[in-house]
Amino acid sequence: EIVLTQSPTTMAASPGEKVTLTCRASSSVSYMHWYQQRSGTSPKLWIYETSKLASGVPNRFSGSGSGTSYSLTINSMETEDAATYYCQQGSSYPNTFGAGTKLELK
Amino acid sequence: EVQLQESGPGLVKPSQSLSLTCSVTGYSITSNYWGWIRKFPGNKMEWMGYISYSGSTSYNPSLKSRISITRDTSKNQFFLQLNSVTTEDTATYYCARGRIIGGYFDYWGQGVMVTVSS
């Protein structure tokens, strides 16, 4: 199974700061998907197929990467972006998730 | 709008079976894929398996001997059964719609917390 390693595990960012979260796969995958989960709610699809923003996601978010290295970037951190972000690959059986990056507001 | 809602007991005894229902509104389960994903205390997430639009299934090999996913198309529901549970199956269980192209999950239920304890 493909192991996804997210870094950092936790981080804090100030409003307006640029944020980059990374996800590394143990083998090459075709796409990476990202989910945002706020405390007490279910995960929401945030970025799919590496770089496509899900419906309603602000355009300060972007996704990029290929092969084994992927990233989610927030151009300018806002209060509402504080959450845990998970990466997930569905191109190799079985589907797997990363352990998540908890992003806090500084 | 596509909506999913999990239901089932919140407490299961060790060695018994865990059974959950996912009720879907706004979309037919005879299209796309319908999966179960769980999140353990400590935040690890695990894909458990799915049932396809045709009724075929795919399971995580870590669960293959214990899991069954079935459906009732007349009620637009699908089901999870996990046998011989242990305390390590304590988790929040989510149902979700899966997209075969890309393999992502675009609609999720609100989740149901299941505790395995005697």
Image (cartoon, coloured by chain):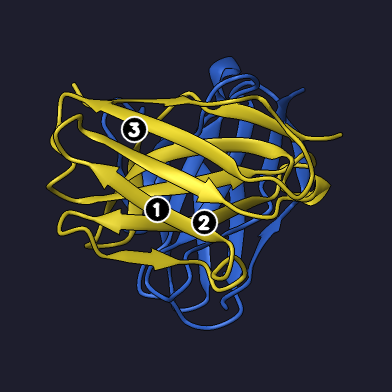
Q: Are marks 1 and 2 in contact (CB under 8 Å)?
A: yes
Q: Which chain is blue?
A: A
What residue is shown with label 2? B48
In this rendering, position of residue A95 left or right of residue B83: left
Residue A28 lies, with reference to residue B99, above or below; the image says below
What residue is shown with label 1? B69
What residue is shown with label 3? A59
SS of the residue under disc 1: strand
Residue at 50 percent across and 34 percent down: it is A43
What is the quadrant of residue B102 in the picture? bottom left
Residue at 50 percent across and 64 percent down: it is A70
Residue B49 lies, with reference to residue A65, above or below; the image says above
Q: Which chain is yellow?
A: B
Q: Residue furthest front?
A: B16
Q: Are marks 2 and 3 in contact (CB under 8 Å)?
A: no
Residue depth check, mark 1 versus mark 3: number of the one nearer the observer: 1
Protein chain holding label 3:
A
Residue type pointed to by label 3: Asn
Residue depth check, mark 2 versus mark 3: number of the one nearer the observer: 2
Give the Cα separation between the discs numbered 1 and 2. 9 Å
The label shown at residue B88 is none
* Residue nearer the viewer, B73 or B4: B73
SS of the residue under disc 3: loop
